[in-house]
Image (cartoon, rainbow, N blue to C red):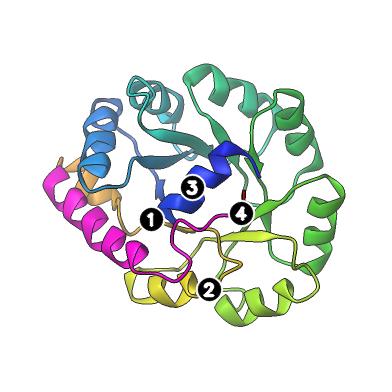
């Protein structure tokens, strides 16, 4: 397991961020850090994504990744902006190869046993499961974990704070991805104190979760 994956596993939570305003990126990163969550996955869903990654990357304490990476060329752009890991919504062999060629950790999205098999064959140890709740939630994860016991999961999609503890209690879950911590409306309104409060609330649950900080070496 990579050092990045271990660090994410220690936090147990990855905020998934959709941000349109470059000027809000650094204050957002600081708000998350103040809430005990120095981690962010900035999605390539807006025109400002690269600039926001660059702004957040000016703080080396932020464990910063790029999400919704769909094409190999986006890997290069994300890395140039300062991302330290890549997340994809689905499994793309081309994106995985581009990440491996650049020696950057990649957590590809999967939703089926077939995609998990593809990830395994590509040498992947940690996968994103997306959209987790829509595909069956913990029932799906438990079914997939049985034949793929060597895999660790980052379920993302439809998971809010009410489900966080349940997901973290399932030990094959390395961490949970969620957008509820960084609502775009709060970011746009620069209500960073509220984001800090949401991060603190979530981290309290993560710290009490079974297996906290017991990530495989």
Task: Residue under label 1, please give it.
Answer: 179
80 or 134: nearer the viewer? 80
Q: Which badge, 2 or 1, is on the more N-terminal residue? A: 2
Of tags 3 and 2, the one toward the viewer is 3
Where residue 115 appears, as percent x and y from the top left, is 79, 59
Disc 2 from disc 1: Cα separation: 13 Å
Q: Which badge, 4 or 3, is on the more N-terminal residue? A: 3
- Assign a secondary structure to mark 4: loop
* Marks 3 & 2, CB-CB < 8 Å contact: no
The answer to whether 165 appears left or right of 45 in the picture is left
Q: Which badge, 3 or 2, is on the more N-terminal residue? A: 3
Of tags 4 and 1, the one toward the viewer is 4
Residue sitting at 51 percent across and 58 percent down?
214
Task: Residue under label 4, please give it.
Answer: 216
Q: Does residue 11 appear anywhere in the picture?
A: yes
Residue 95 belongs to magenta span: no
Where residue 68 appears, as percent x and y from the top left, is 56, 43
Disc 1 from disc 3: Cα separation: 16 Å
Disc 4 from disc 3: Cα separation: 12 Å
Task: Residue under label 3, please give it.
Answer: 8
Disc 4 from disc 1: Cα separation: 26 Å
Judged by its main secondary structure, the magenta piece is helix
Q: Does residue 191 appear anywhere in the picture?
A: no
Disc 3 from disc 2: Cα separation: 21 Å
Q: Which residues are magenta?
A: 192-216
- Residue 133 is labelled as 2
């Amino acid at each position: 397991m990579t050092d990045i994956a271990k660090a994410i596993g220690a936090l147990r939570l990855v905020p998934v961020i959709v941000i349109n305003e470059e000027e809000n990126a650094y204050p957002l990163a600081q708000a998350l850090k103040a809430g005990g969550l120095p981690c962010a996955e900035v999605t390539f869903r807006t025109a400002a994504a690269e600039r926001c990654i660059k702004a957040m990357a000016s703080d080396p304490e932020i464990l910063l990744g790029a999400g919704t990476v769909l094409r190999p060329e986006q890997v290069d752009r994300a890395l140039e902006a300062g991302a330290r890991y890549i997340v994809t919504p689905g499994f793309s062999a081309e994106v995985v190869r581009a990440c491996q060629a650049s020696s950057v950790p990649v957590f590809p999205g999967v939703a089926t046993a077939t995609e998990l098999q593809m990830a395994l064959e590509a040498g992947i140890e940690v996968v994103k499961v997306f959209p987790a709740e829509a595909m069956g939630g913990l029932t799906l994860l438990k079914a997939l974990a049985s034949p793929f016991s060597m895999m660790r999961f980052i379920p993302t999609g439809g998971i809010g704070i009410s489900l966080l503890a349940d997901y973290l209690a399932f030990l094959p879950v390395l961490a949970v991805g969620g957008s509820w911590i960084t609502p775009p409306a709060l970011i746009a309104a620069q209500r960073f104190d509220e984001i800090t409060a949401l991060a603190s609330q979530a981290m309290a649950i993560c710290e009490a979760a079974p297996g906290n900080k017991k990530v495989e070496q």
